[in-house]
Amino acid sequence: MSASAKPEKDAAATGEGEEKAEAAGGGELLYCGGTSFDTMGRKVVGGPQGNLVSPTRLRPLVGVDIRFVASGCTACHCVALDAEGRCYTWGRNEKGQLGHGDTLLRNLPTVVSELSKQLLNLQIQKIESSPVPCLVAEATNAVCGADFTVWLSSVEGSSILTAGLPQYGQLGHGTDNEYNAKDSSVKLQYDPQPRPRAISTLSGKTIVKVACGTNHTVAVDSSGFVYTWGFGGYGRLGHREQKDEWQPRLVEVFQKNNVLPPNAVVSAGSASSACTAGGGQLYMWGKLKNTGDDWMYPKPLMDLSGWNIRCMASGNMHHVVGADDSCISWGVAIHGELGYGPNGQKSSANPKKVDILEGMHATSVGCGCGWSLIVVDRSNIGDRLDELEIYDGDTSTQVEEVNVQATKKASASTNSRANKRKKNKDLSDSEEDEDESGDDENGEEKEAKGRRGRKPSNRGRGRGAKKVAPEPKTSGRGRGRPKKTESPAQKAGSSGRGGKRGRGRPRK
């Protein structure tokens, strides 16, 4: 069902639903998308496997009140917080990003109990796996890009701080810290900024909202003005050009009567940005589709006009919105992250309702590299959650078995081809032996027709090919070709023109 139609609003009902969600302190977490975290975002033979194409409950979180979920547009792991303060993580863990003190992959949410305080020596650097105090005082929020972090603080004059990789100017300090690796080399490197540092150009502003894409940042101050900086490709900064911005730059569209309200929603995808402005209208800009022109400046998404958008998240190339009593998704998807079900479409260029969640109140959403996280309020939905499937983590095992079987099948096919070549070779060798024995029996015939002008012994013809008797060549200068004896008549006919014609029609 398309989301372009304006829903019937009931302000009292909406307010009541939000109050119940707050009173409950959380809701049920639903998941849709890929489950093979070790292969997510990587090229795999046979394509993606083990996808959950419909919103599905996760066994460890059934009945748990989840109040917040988070992931990243290029991340391959998930984080969830429940109403009692417990933290759950799952997904890829090759760098220890799940915080369990190891590098083991988790297919299902696992409570982060404690972290090892052991120092791991890796080459020259030391990585501390236990939490350490951060230099950001009175932090109120934190978001992450691919290689950098942004903090919001309540300290006056330092409401926004950044640290990490300064490439593309994504830290907002007016430089990318670029330098040559060697005096004699043209290879460029970027000196990282390991400590949080306040953005001086925003010292007079109070930043209240922030979102990060892969290499760009979107921030909103207390007056409702929007600032963007970092990588400018595909127009993701909204300045009508693709130039990188090393310092926060005001987005001109959101001024005067179109500033953002206090309850505005801000989101950033891998190559796009979005926010809700006056009247709750959703604006988007950047690369939104694989085909067509990019949106170089913020444009209203008219399909969602009139919807009360509460939460939004953007993945690599897909988006999920919680609005009124519906969940809406759209974009490019390959793992079923839009949640349209096994009989639904895979991708959608326009916002579309997730039919199975119609009537449910989404309180929080999150998007990763190939999945979506949706928290729905349990009130006023009866036993509809019982109709949804529950994922136990078995799909990953099936995927591994499929991959193994495919590998074995490929190996068997390879062995079959190798055996076939071997049989052909043996067959050819046996035919050569038969030819040689036949020539030995004929005696003198071996000298006349044996090795001279004989065709190859059917090597590579395949199994069951008919044996072709060797025939002497009638023309051409083959190896060891015997001298041709000419009759007196032929000599007389070829005596003209120096006797070099030899063949062809005689002169009249």
Image: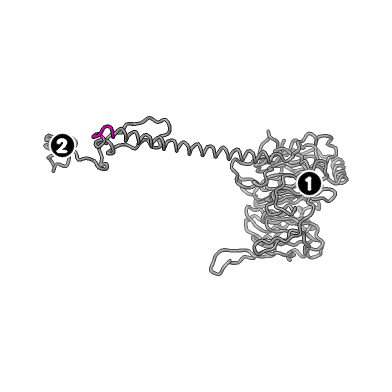
Residue at horizontal 76 percent and vertical 46 percent from the top: 109
How far from the left and from the top, in percent, is residue 316? 67, 48
Name the residue that disc number 1 marks: 364
Q: Quadrant of residue 219?
A: bottom right
- The answer to whether mark 1 and mark 2 are in CB contact below 8 A is no
Circle 1: residue type: Ser
Q: Is residue 211 magenta?
A: no
How far from the left and from the top, in percent, is residue 173? 69, 64
How far from the left and from the top, in percent, is residue 277? 76, 50
For disc 2, the neighbor class at 10 Å (few under 14, some 14 to 19, many from 20) is few
Residue at horizontal 58 percent and vertical 63 percent from the top: 188
N-terminal of the two: label 1 or label 2? 1
Q: Give the range drawn in magenta.
A: 440-445
From the viewer's perspective, tell me whether residue 379 is left or right of residue 507: right
From the viewer's perspective, tell me whether residue 161 is left or right of residue 21: left
Kindly report the secondary structure that dominates the magenta region of the rendered protein.
helix
Who is closer to the viewer here, 486 or 5? 486
Who is closer to the viewer here, 310 or 460? 460
Q: Which of marks 1 and 2 is in front?
A: 2
Element at label 2: loop
Quarter containing the N terminus: top right
| Distance (Cα) linking label 1 and label 2 | 100 Å
Q: Is residue 444 magenta?
A: yes
